[in-house]
Image (cartoon, helix red, strand yellow):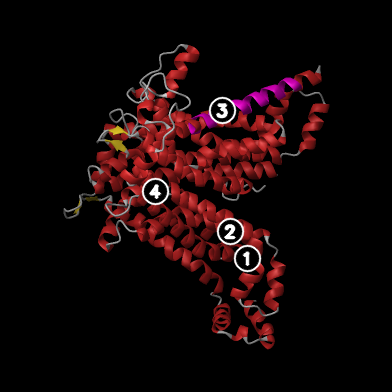
Amino acid sequence: MASSIAETAAPKKTAMQSSWVSRFQRWLEQKGLFSWGLVLPALLVLVPVVIGPTLYVLFMSFMKYTPGDPMQFVGLRNFYRAFTTARFWHGMYITAWFVFFSIGVQLVLGFITALSLQRVDIRLRRVATAIILVPMMIAPTVVGVLWKMIFKARYGALNYLLERAFHIQGPDWLANNTAALAGLLIADIWEWTPFITILLLAGLQSLPREIYEAAYMDGSRAWQVFKNMTLPMMKPFIFLAVFLRMIDAFKTFDLIFGVTRGGPGDFTESIGWYTYKIGFTYFEQGYAAALSVIQLLIIIFIGKALLSQLTRVSTASQG
Amino acid sequence: MEKKKFALADVVAYAVVILVLIWTIFPLYWLFITAFKPLEEFMTYPPTFWPTHWTLDNFTEALIRQHGLPALWDSLVISLGTLIVALLVGVPAAYSIARHRTGGDNLSFTILSFRFMPAIVPVVALFLIANKLKIFDTYFLLIITNCMAVIPFVVWIMKGFFDEIPYQIEEAAMVDGASWPRLFKDHLLPLAAPGLVAVGLFAFIFAWNELLFATILTGRNLTPFTKIVPGINIGHVEPHWGGIAAIGLLVIIPIVIGSWYLQKYIVRGLSYGAIRE
């Protein structure tokens, strides 16, 4: 196909087109290599930075290794160690807790915000959307320190406002286990609810308006319209938002780096933060590699499960 | 009766939007005033909601005394480098996948799945390999590692943009015998330009905000700002909050301006092209 185009074009050659570039292109097209040639540079960057190191991590997960010492084969002992370590399970528990609650709260708040934004004047909607974008676009490290500042027990804004508005004596946010975890959650909600709001708002705006009008004409109540029409039609958007947020929430690292650094003690340590400490504070890099492999398997599992749900939901809603 | 109920819903909607705006803006406002407060004022109780004395000391502290300027420079070089490499290799790949269906669904989904890989997974190996190859703590290393997440993004979003450009224009040009560079420059680039700018901005922002690689794969040589922001201290332990706020404010300003432009593309960007407005 490509070569036939090249042949018909041949008689019309001009000086410019007989350059080495076009001759090379024609040669590639004749060999059927042109389209692969365009993809090749991307693969040449991605394969060494993604696939190579991932395979190497898999290899290292069977080794005992600390920089400076020789590598030593230990079989499955790193994995055994992980599964018998309380701190590992605590990290998994905190991660699961965090993923579940942050996404749950964000979904509810994001949906309410999206529904509200859809109702208000279009100019206010534009300005408001532009403003709520900011938290998720700025560096998560800055988000972290920003909230840390607000959480400060004595001079922070939050406890002062709690005291003034509700006469509540706020906790020392970062020194108390539950409060620190709640603090992480609050910062995450501030940062990522906009993500869900914006995706759901796009979804709401894509819904056919006529159906709504017909429903209201029938005298259906707002709640019924929402439950029987909006919600089912929004399903693909909700799934997409949850899918993307879940994968990112599972990886949460930046926020912990900024706000709690895993503390107090190791209480707010996610599995990612635990791996980081093992690999780059204690330098037990064989064990860290095993922890990485476990996380990779979990993310593949979550990804596959959610993706099949997502395709099921979106094909169902289209059909 | 019916009308009154609708009015109530509108009132609720406006109230929610205003509350959300206050909730969003307040922490940013706090960052802003902290950056301009003298350090002593940060430590007073009750906290002041408007600086009583405005000062630029925090900026000189963060940028000069705590080496914020070189950190910003490092972040800038890494982000621009990532932007350039990701666009140079990502855009042709996106074009090829959009036009020739190169590699079918397998290739494009494999590329996308790289974006979802937690950075913590390959980083242990990258640390070791980089040390062996003597590229640890270099711009080169950080640029190519950032590409891990950015190239998949560029490929997917640009593929969507190319899908929207009618193929007939290129076919006509090809029949006229235009070579690929000509085709690209005269026929494709003008149509794809808005998409390219948006994707480039996203790529820059990703790299600018990146933390994990910036922390682990750098040593004495490079200090991207994401790594040093939480460590701006008075002495060894107590954070210099004014300094932190000052550099925090500086690094988010360009991003806020950039995301203003990105509004139009934000939904498409966030959903990897799954939702198009």
Residue drawn 39% across the image and 46% down it: A297
Foreground disc of the pair 2, 3: 3
Depicted A86 relative to depicted B141: above or below: above
Q: Chain of mark 4?
A: B
Depicted B235 relative to depicted B189: above or below: above
Q: Compare marks 1 and 2 and give the one earlier in the sequence.
A: 1
Q: Which mark is residue A179?
A: none
- Decide if residue A34 is in sight here: yes
Label 2 Cα crowd, 10 Å radius (few <14 / some 14-19 / many 20+): some
User: In this rendering, do the residues under marks 4 and 1 share a single chain?
Assistant: yes
Disc 2: which residue: B196
Disc 3: which residue: B22
Q: Going by the image, does B191 lie left or right of B137?
A: right
Disc 1: which residue: B189
What is the three-letter code of the residue carrying label 3? Answer: Ile
What is the three-letter code of the residue carrying label 2? Answer: Leu
Residue drawn 62% across the image and 27% down it: B18
Estimate the spatial distance between the alpha carbons at disc 2 and disc 4, rounded to whole Å.
25 Å
Secondary structure at badge 1 equals: helix
Give the residue furthest to the left.
A69
- B87 part of magenta stretch: no
In-front residue for pair B229/A232: B229
In-front residue for pair B222/A270: B222
Secondary structure at badge 4 equals: loop
Estimate the spatial distance between the alpha carbons at disc 1 and disc 2, rounded to whole Å.
9 Å
Q: Compare marks 3 and 1 and give the one earlier in the sequence.
A: 3
- Is the C-beta separation of discs 4 and 1 under 8 Å? no
Region of the chain picked out in magenta, as a range? B7-28
Q: Going by the image, does A92 lie left or right of A112?
A: left
